[in-house]
Image: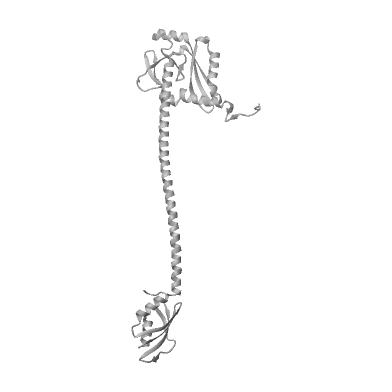
């Protein structure tokens, strides 16, 4: 249960009547005399006043003469009871009910003979000022028959001018214009729906296309990730291999191959020299041998870039048959040239 003293007003509007305000806003947008929609879609009406005539659309005079399927008769002021009513802004949703009460209270004619219409004269922050026109149906039909030879109440619209504003009196021939306006509204709404569907269709197509592109990019990303993972694995293997090679090179540098050094010595020494003892510990080489010229052997080893620190730990001694015995120590360079 809601408390009786609970305040439901917001900015001067009773929120319990929010639905009415919403309906009234849509009614004003589509059906009000000053509606921008109606000003664009309403039928052009030719209004006759005696021998003169003018074209109006949504109550506003049109420049020039336009083709029109609807016509109206402007009643003289002597047949019209006019009133101006100010309605507060918060009561605008109840405007029609207020005008009906005002017509019942102000009409000098019988209820069945009363016809009336209204239009907005001005609108401001405090509310709206409405022009109310009340006529007698029988007197109006007598005037139409006498002046225009119209005897059918639905043949012509009946208009009244109040304070420079055209007011349509309800209950005569305005139904034709209302039906035409309703058809135009439905046609325009249908066009808007079609355009909205086309826009949604284009957006959906673009979304599907982008989705397909995204899926393709995701597949490419998966393939690229796999290839990158394989490349990373191969790079890791290459790094391990390089480390192994570096370690092997370091070992080779610390412990050169005796076979390679024997081959090098064989290439360096001529047939007149021989090696009777070869010992190698790491890069250190110890040699003992015989040659016709032991000093020449020492010089050859000294000139060889693969060896450094070539020394003779013992003096060269002469032996039988013109041979000299030598003892040489050498150190293999860390970077041995090919």
| Above or below: residue 99 compared with residue 152 | below
* Spot occupied by residue 237 in the image (x, y as percentages of width and height): 44, 60
**Quarter of the rendering occupied by the N terminus:** top right
| Above or below: residue 301 compared with residue 54 | below
* Spot occupied by residue 264 in the image (x, y as percentages of width and height): 37, 78
Q: Is residue 318 visible?
A: yes
Closest to the observer, 307 or 15: 307
Residue 192 appears in which quarter of the rendering?
Answer: top left
Closest to the observer, 52 or 263: 263
Residue 279 appears in which quarter of the rendering?
Answer: bottom left
| Above or below: residue 140 compared with residue 93 | above
Q: Residue furthest left?
A: 271
Task: Identify which residue is drawn at 43% across, 58% down.
Answer: 234
Q: Is residue 89 visible?
A: no
Residue 301 appears in which quarter of the rendering?
Answer: bottom left
* Spot occupied by residue 203 in the image (x, y as percentages of width and height): 42, 36
How many marks can you see?
Answer: 0
Closest to the observer, 177 or 131: 177
* Spot occupied by residue 304 in the image (x, y as percentages of width and height): 37, 80
**Quarter of the rendering occupied by the C terminus:** bottom left
Along the horizontal axis of the image, is 253 left or right of 270? Answer: right
Task: Identify which residue is drawn at 40% across, 79% down.
Answer: 307
Protein image colouring = one colour
| Above or below: residue 205 compared with residue 130 | below
């Amino acid at each position: 249960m809601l408390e009786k003293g609970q305040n439901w007003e917001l900015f001067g509007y009773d929120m319990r009547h929010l639905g009415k305000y919403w309906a009234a806003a849509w009614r004003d947008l589509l059906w009000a005399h000053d509606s921008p929609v109606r000003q664009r879609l309403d039928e052009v009406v030719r209004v006759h006043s005696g021998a003169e005539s003018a074209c109006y659309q949504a109550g506003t005079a049109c420049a020039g003469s336009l083709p029109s399927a609807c016509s109206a008769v402007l009643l003289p002021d002597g047949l019209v009871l006019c009133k101006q009513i100010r309605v507060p802004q918060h009561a605008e949703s109840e405007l029609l009910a207020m005008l009906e009460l005002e017509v019942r209270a102000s009409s000098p004619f019988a209820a069945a003979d009363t016809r009336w219409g209204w239009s907005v004269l001005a609108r401001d922050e405090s509310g709206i000022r409405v022009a109310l026109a009340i006529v007698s149906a029988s007197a109006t039909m007598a005037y139409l028959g006498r002046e225009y030879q119209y005897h059918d109440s639905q043949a012509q619209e009946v208009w009244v001018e109040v304070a420079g504003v055209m007011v349509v009196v309800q209950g005569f021939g305005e139904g034709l214009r209302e039906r035409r306006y309703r058809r135009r509204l439905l046609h325009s709404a249908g066009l808007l729906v079609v355009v909205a569907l086309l826009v949604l269709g284009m957006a959906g197509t673009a979304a599907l296309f982008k989705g397909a592109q995204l899926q393709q990019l995701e597949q490419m990303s998966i393939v690229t990730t796999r290839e990158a993972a394989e490349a990373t694995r191969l790079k890791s293997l290459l790094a391990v291999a390089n480390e192994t090679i570096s370690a092997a090179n370091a070992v080779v540098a610390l412990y050169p191959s005796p076979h390679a050094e024997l081959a090098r010595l064989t290439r360096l020494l001529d047939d007149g020299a021989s090696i009777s003892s070869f010992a190698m510990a790491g890069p250190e080489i110890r040699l003992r041998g015989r040659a016709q010229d032991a000093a020449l052997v020492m010089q050859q080893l000294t000139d060889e870039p693969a060896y450094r620190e070539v020394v003779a730990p013992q003096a060269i001694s002469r032996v039988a048959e013109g041979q000299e015995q030598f003892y040489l120590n050498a150190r293999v360079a860390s970077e041995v040239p090919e």
